[in-house]
Image (cartoon, grey):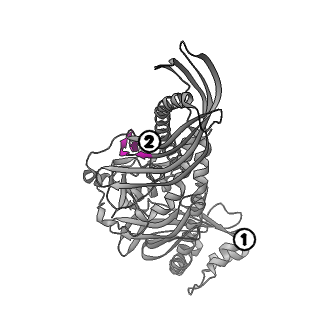
Amino acid sequence: MPGKVPLLLLLSLLSWFGTSHCCLQDPASAYRFTGAVCRLTYPAAVVLNEKTTKVIEAAFQHARYPSMKGEKSLLFIGKVMYGLDNLEIHNLSIGQSAFELHPGEGIAMEISNVSAVFKGSIQYGYGSWLVNFGHSVDFEIDSQIDLGINPKLYCGDGKVAADTADCYLNFHKLRLHLQGDKEPNWLKKLFTDFITLTVKLVIKGQICKEINKAANILADFIQDTAEQFLTDGDISVDIGIAAAPVITANYIESYHKGLTKYNNKVAVINESVFQPSHLTEDRMIYFWISDQFLNPMLKAAHQDGRFQLNVSGEELTTLLRTNLSTAMPELIRKCLLDAASPELRLWSSSVPHLNSSTSGTTVWVQASGRLHCEGQGTPVLFFQTDMAVDITTSYVNKKVLLQGHPTEISAFRAELPLQDQQRHDEALEFLKEAVVKVGTPKVLSVLGVELTRLLDKQGLYQFDVFNPEVLPRDGFVVIQMDFGFPHHLLVEFLKRTLQ
């Protein structure tokens, strides 16, 4: 189906994924090295088109036009010498911006009905045996232009780049007026017609140059934002593209490595299962994320000590008294009641492992815990268990929500003080029920809050995200959503462009 979406903002979304150092020529051969895929579909067109004209306006307004000097011999007049200086643009308006996707080729972009007045000063003189004089006056150029660009997307230094060399301007009107005179005499008209041809070449060259510059600035700006978004502390992600983007009639798709970096080590992905059929075209944007992308991130978070939770005081007492049918062991009850600040310390004692399937996402982890009473350096209780938890993820009202329940608990062991060893079985049953009914929901709740905090820190809350869905599949997860292009990003970009 034919369609129209704006070029520069489209490139900006693809540029959300970072730099790398090499790309495979054939996208299909890159699938197994792909940790993440971004598919942008035609329903995104309306949102992006609303913003494109702002970027084009910035390109026109930020263009700097060089001074021009020249001379020409005219019949009956003699030699004409001229110089144009201080050329500036005023009263800019843009009718509409649209482009079409050409499958397997590139993008055809059209900016139509661009109206502007160029102002500056001109020095000119002409003479012969009949006349010989010179002038220095202000001038205006009325213009109406259509701009066309046929960019080609390619892999440039490991990121999505665009070659905008195929750029042209059609001038429907370009008329120069001297001293505000809209109806020049025959001598001025002869002169201004000649000057107009020169101005056309200058405007075309500078506008096309500025469009290319704006595209590069926008890509770099989004790139910088993306790198910050995907970095927290010592953990970062290399999601440079593995192959050049693919353009079809209905979407643009880009393929990214998704390699976690931590402590000078980089993860490896070489058995990814991506196929284009995994994604549809009903939503505005899709992110395909491999389990091979997610598991190294879990490993890095574990090694960085991210999976730790301390619960103390009244909060701990309330949790352990909630919805538990097993009697609370005396040593735990005494600790909670007699100690002013009892504390339960929980952490992941093995690297978590995630597996996605059509039935859901399951995480295997070994969890450990210690119960400390006030003033006691030695815990009154230690426990450890291997467990599998089925987890569902959603993003509602700009908050990450994690829900789940253990599907398997094994190798559960508990260590008690010598005087309480006879109550080992009683403590074990209580702890198992507490892990299922209290511990798992509490950990997932806190993890959801922390993930929301992290995403807010990176600025996700500023994006308009509509009806996001997280869909686990066999070996990967699909995130699909509609969106509104964040106005604040456009404002920041325009500020940087116009500096």
Q: Residue at x 43, y 50 (%)?
A: 110
Image quarter of the N terminus: bottom left
Question: For numbered disc 2, what is the local secondary structure?
Answer: strand
Q: Main secondary structure of the magenta part?
A: strand
Q: Residue at x 65, y 36 (%)?
A: 180
Q: In the image, which disc is placed on residue 169?
A: 2
Q: Nearer the viewer, residue 276 or 498?
A: 498
Indicate which label's residue lies in the foreground, 1 or 2. 2
Residue labelled with disc 1: 339
x then y, percent, for residue 60: 55, 42
| 68 w.r.t. 420: above or below | above
Q: Quadrant of residue 388?
A: bottom left
Would you say 81 lies left or right of 158 here?
Answer: right
| Residue reaching furthest to the front | 130
The amino acid marked with disc number 1 is Ala
> Magenta segment, which residues?
147-165
The amino acid marked with disc number 2 is Leu
